[in-house]
Amino acid sequence: MEEERRKDIELANLNASEKIPFEELLSEKELKISQKFFEFVKRRLNVINWLPKYDQTQAIGDFIAGVTIGLTMIPQSLAYANLANVPAVYGLYSAFAGSIIYTLMGTVREVSIGPTSLMSIITVSYTYEKPIEYVFIMTFVCGCVEMIMGILRLGFLVDFISIPVVSAFSTSTAILIIVAQLKNLFGLNFSGKSLPAIILKLGENIKYLRVGDAMLGICAIMFLLFMKYLNDIKAKVSNPILKRSLFYLSLAKNALAVVITTSIAYALAKNPDIEIPFKLSEKVPQGIPSFKLPPFTAMDGNRTIEFTEIASDIGSGFILLPMVSILANVAIAKAFSSGKIVDATQEMIALGMCNVLGSFFQSMPTAGAFTRSALSNVSGVQTPFAGIYSAIIALLALTLLTPYFNFIPKATLAAILICAVYTLIDFSIAPKLWEKSKLDFLSWSGCIIACMVAGVEAGLLVGILLSILNIFIKAARPNLLIYVEKTKDHQHIYVRPSSGIFFPGIDNLREQINIALVKTEFKFPITLDLIKISSIDYSSLKGLESIVKDLKKFNLLVKFINVDEKIQRRLNFN
């Protein structure tokens, strides 16, 4: 009896042991691979992290923010397409694809991907008077470069663009945009790339100024500035309903300007006896573009331009544009991250994917827009899902409103651009740079001058080169603290470099020590304080050893203090 009971227990244990979870059937190696793959997917598709916790409160906040951004993005997209010298519809094509992709991959809820003034003006500097296919190819290649930079973790390259250069670049870009849009504001027709060329053409053509365009454009600017002022008035209003109304009226200023002026043009067009006194936008084809690989050739009349020639024409644009867009996107992400660490790698990959897939819909190069991102923040955005609503608004505009887009006055779009970028002009930084760092002032002023004369792409490169030169100069001429120190027992020459000692600066260090020795008639030994030196190269090590050997000839000692342990092991004075 006892034996049978024991068999029953053993059988029960055996049956229980057969209930093995599926995960345990995987080998340890396979389990690690599956875990790593899942972690990789979670990292790259950020939507997996927040969508399961999505609730009704977040949905309402995203809906309000998304619709607000969508209504703002439509007139901006049309204006930025105009700035990039492409038909207005391509601005709308650029407004939906990036918003959808960023919803899936983006990490910062406030970022609004789409066409921007910065992307447009850099794009036009490389594609001006070129076939439209240049724009799509530029979008595709730049997206690929952005993804590669993200995968290789090359985001540190944007650190070589210093704050003075960013300020100069933004100021120059804003000035160029404003001056370039004066031709549309005044109804003129001419072409020019650099600031001197545009001003020269403007002076030559000012006699052809169209009064209707000028009046409409100036009125639109006044309207936009007044609507922006409403946002300042709301701070003085105590009634919460009125305050909220003024806030949303101010937010909708661009859309209102387009609706009002387009309605006027539409009403005038209905009367065949009245000639419309201002220029209108081109006709926009209705519908969503087909999803297809961007063409890698272009047609110029009857001549086919191969990709190699296109790549040669665009040249540095394939590197410069991704660098600037990454800089803009990461800067926006950091501005709205509320102290959290920004995954720059994921932001670059997400931005690259937005441009690559956007090029399949004939998109212009896109990036995060600071103004729209700030608007998204104040509108109560909760998650990146707000981008879906923005994309829906853009798609509705393409399917329902395109018959009316050709009634949008060009002067209105010019006014929107001018009012959008004039706040970027900042000359107040100049006296601060002059006071704090002459080398930074040189980078700032050099970048502005180059942008104005040679174009923004050349200007930014000049600014970056000047910033790098700034680093080299500081490495070659680090600040030195040198004085004669008296103690109870003796006197010595105290020397303390302010930063790392590298090969461009070692000769200067030796020269300054020699000057101090000559002034003191070689009477005092040297105390070299390396407290601020954490790294040193081979040439500098040999230079320090030469200083010791030189002073031995005069029976003078060199005392090293506060030496890093790693550096101490590398020094050899034998």
Image (cartoon, rainbow, N blue to C red):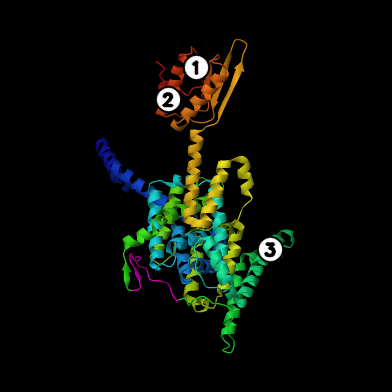
Toward the viewer: 28 or 19?
Answer: 28
Quarter occupied by the N terminus: top left
Toward the viewer: 313 or 39?
Answer: 313
The residue labelled by disc 2 is 541
Q: Which mark is residue 477?
A: none
Dot 3 falls on a residue whose secondary structure is: helix
The residue shown at (58%, 80%) is 265
The residue shown at (70%, 63%) is 243
- Give the residue type that dot 3 points to: Tyr
Dot 2 falls on a residue whose secondary structure is: helix
- Give the residue type that dot 1 points to: Val
**Left or right: 65 in relation to 313:** right
**Left or right: 373 in relation to 365:** right
Spatial separation of the CA atoms under disc 1 and disc 3: 67 Å
- Give the residue type that dot 2 points to: Leu
What secondary structure predominates along the stretch shown in magenta? loop
Toward the viewer: 317 or 383?
Answer: 317
Q: Position of residue 277 (x, y in %)?
A: 59, 80
Asked if the magenta segment contains residue 305, the reply would be no
Toward the viewer: 103 or 344?
Answer: 344
Quarter occupied by the C terminus: top left
- Name which quarter of the figure residue 59 lies in: bottom right
The residue labelled by disc 3 is 229
> Over which residues does the magenta segment extend?
285-301
Query: Furthest residue to the top?
Result: 489
The residue labelled by disc 1 is 558
Dot 1 falls on a residue whose secondary structure is: strand
Query: Which one is earlier in the sequence, the residue at label 2 or at label 3?
Result: 3
